[in-house]
C-alpha cells in the first residue's frame, strides 16, 4: 500500500512540475516582483506571467460523514482477562455516522505543491447489527481527537485545473486503547469562473474521486451498559441460547455479560476487531467562492458508498521577504 501512495505522489509532482499551473494560478501582466517568502520559485512564476494566490492559509472545516463498515475476527474478554476469539457472533450491517470539526494550516512551498497539517475533534455514532447468535442492534457513541498531515499537487490542463492529494490522520477515541490510522487520497478536476468587474472574486466547481483506507485492527474497552441496551425479549433470547452453550470460556464471557445486565456494575467488555470500509471509493462534487484574495468559502459533497458534507472557511495571507522591493 505504501509504495502505491508514494508512486501516486511522484506522478502528481511530475505532472504538476511539467504544466506549472492550477486553480490558484492565472495569467497576469503585473510588473511587481513577487513579495512573499513562499512559494519557492514564486518570483520565477511571477516573471512568467502567473498570479499566485496568497501562500499561507488557516482553514476551519466541518464534516458530516455516513458510511458502512465491515467487521470480522471478533475477540472478547471481561475486565482484566485475556482476549479470546469469538466465533459464534456474526455481524450484519454496521453503519458509522461521524461529525468532525478541525483547523487546517497550509503553505504553498512550490507553486504546484502544497503541504498542510490539521487537528480536530470528532464524535462517532456506530450502529451495529448482529445476526447471530440472536438478532440484536446496538448503538454506541465514541468521541475523541485527531491530527494529521498531507500533501497536495496541482496543475492545469487547458481550461481545467487538476488537484491530487494524500493525507494521513491519527485518531484517539475514548473507547480505544491505541490511535487508529487512516489514509485518504483524492483527485479533483474542475473549472474556475471569474466574476465580472470583480478581479479578486471567482467561483470554482469540481468533480472528483476519493479513496480511503482505515487501520484494520481496533482494540478497546466499553462497559456493558454502554455497549448493550437490550429489550426484555432480546435478553430472553440470549438467555435461552446461553443455556444451550457448552461449558467453556465463551460461556463464561456471555454469562458475565448477562449477569451485568441483570445487576449493572462497572464490568468492562474488552474487544479486538478487524474493520474495513464496505467500499473504499466514493465520488465528490464541490464548489468554492473566493470572496477576495484573503477569504474563501467552500462546500463539498461525497456520494456513493460514503455520504459526506463539508463546509469550510479559509483565510489566506502572505509573509513578505526581507528584501522585497517593487520594480
Image (cartoon, helix red, strand yellow):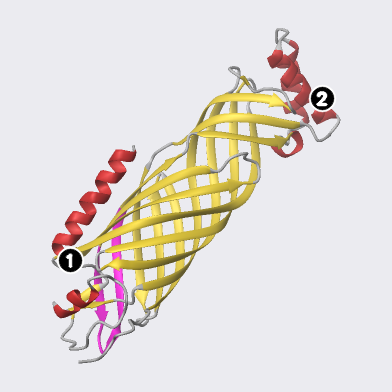
Q: Secondary structure at mark 1?
A: loop
Residue 325 or residue 280, whichever sits in front: 325
Quadrant where the C terminus sits is bottom left
Quick check: 139 above or below 143?
above
Residue depicted at 67% across the width and 30% down the height = 270
Q: Position of residue 226 (x, y in %)?
A: 72, 39
Q: Main secondary structure of the magenta part?
A: strand
Q: Which mark is residue 20?
A: 1
Quadrant where the N terminus sits is top left
Q: Which mark is residue 259?
A: 2
Q: Is residue 37 magenta?
A: no
Q: Position of residue 140 (x, y in %)?
A: 65, 42
Q: Quadrant of residue 55?
A: bottom left
Q: Which residues are magenta?
A: 190-208
* Mark positioned earlier in the residue sequence (2 or 1): 1
Quick check: 68 above or below 29?
above
Q: Is residue 192 magenta?
A: yes
Amino acid at each position: 500500500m505504501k509504495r502505491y501512495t508514494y508512486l501516486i505522489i511522484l506522478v502528481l509532482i511530475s505532472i504538476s512540475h511539467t504544466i506549472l499551473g492550477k486553480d490558484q494560478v492565472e495569467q497576469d501582466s503585473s510588473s511587481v516582483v513577487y513579495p512573499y517568502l513562499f512559494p519557492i520559485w514564486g518570483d520565477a512564476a511571477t516573471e512568467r506571467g502567473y498570479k499566485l494566490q496568497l501562500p499561507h492559509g488557516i482553514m476551519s472545516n466541518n464534516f458530516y460523514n455516513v458510511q458502512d463498515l465491515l467487521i470480522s475476527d471478533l475477540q472478547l474478554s471481561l475486565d482484566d482477562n485475556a482476549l479470546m476469539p469469538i466465533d459464534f457472533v456474526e455481524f450484519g450491517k454496521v453503519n458509522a455516522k461521524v461529525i468532525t470539526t478541525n483547523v487546517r494550516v497550509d503553505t504553498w512551498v512550490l507553486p504546484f505543491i502544497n503541504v498542510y497539517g490539521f487537528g480536530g475533534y470528532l464524535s462517532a455514532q456506530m450502529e451495529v447489527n448482529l445476526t447471530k447468535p440472536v438478532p440484536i442492534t446496538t448503538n454506541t457513541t465514541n468521541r475523541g481527537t485527531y491530527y494529521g498531515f498531507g500533501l497536495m499537487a496541482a496543475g492545469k490542463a487547458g481550461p481545467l485545473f487538476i488537484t491530487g492529494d494524500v493525507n494521513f490522520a491519527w485518531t484517539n477515541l475514548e473507547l480505544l486503547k491505541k490511535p487508529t490510522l487512516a489514509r485518504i487520497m483524492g483527485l479533483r478536476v474542475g473549472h474556475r469562473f471569474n466574476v465580472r468587474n470583480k478581479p479578486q472574486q471567482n467561483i470554482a466547481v469540481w468533480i472528483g474521486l476519493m479513496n480511503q483506507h482505515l487501520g484494520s485492527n481496533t482494540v478497546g474497552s466499553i462497559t456493558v451498559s454502554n455497549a448493550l441496551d437490550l429489550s426484555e425479549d432480546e435478553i430472553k433470547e440470549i438467555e435461552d441460547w446461553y443455556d444451550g452453550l457448552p461449558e467453556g470460556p465463551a460461556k463464561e464471557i456471555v454469562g458475565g455479560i448477562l449477569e451485568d445486565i441483570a445487576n449493572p456494575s462497572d464490568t468492562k467488555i474488552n474487544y479486538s476487531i478487524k474493520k474495513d470500509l464496505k467500499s473504499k471509493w466514493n465520488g465528490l462534487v464541490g464548489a468554492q467562492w473566493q470572496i477576495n484574495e484573503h477569504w474563501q468559502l467552500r462546500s463539498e459533497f461525497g456520494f456513493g458508498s460514503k455520504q459526506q458534507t463539508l463546509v469550510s472557511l479559509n483565510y489566506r495571507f502572505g509573509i513578505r521577504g526581507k528584501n522585497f522591493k517593487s520594480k
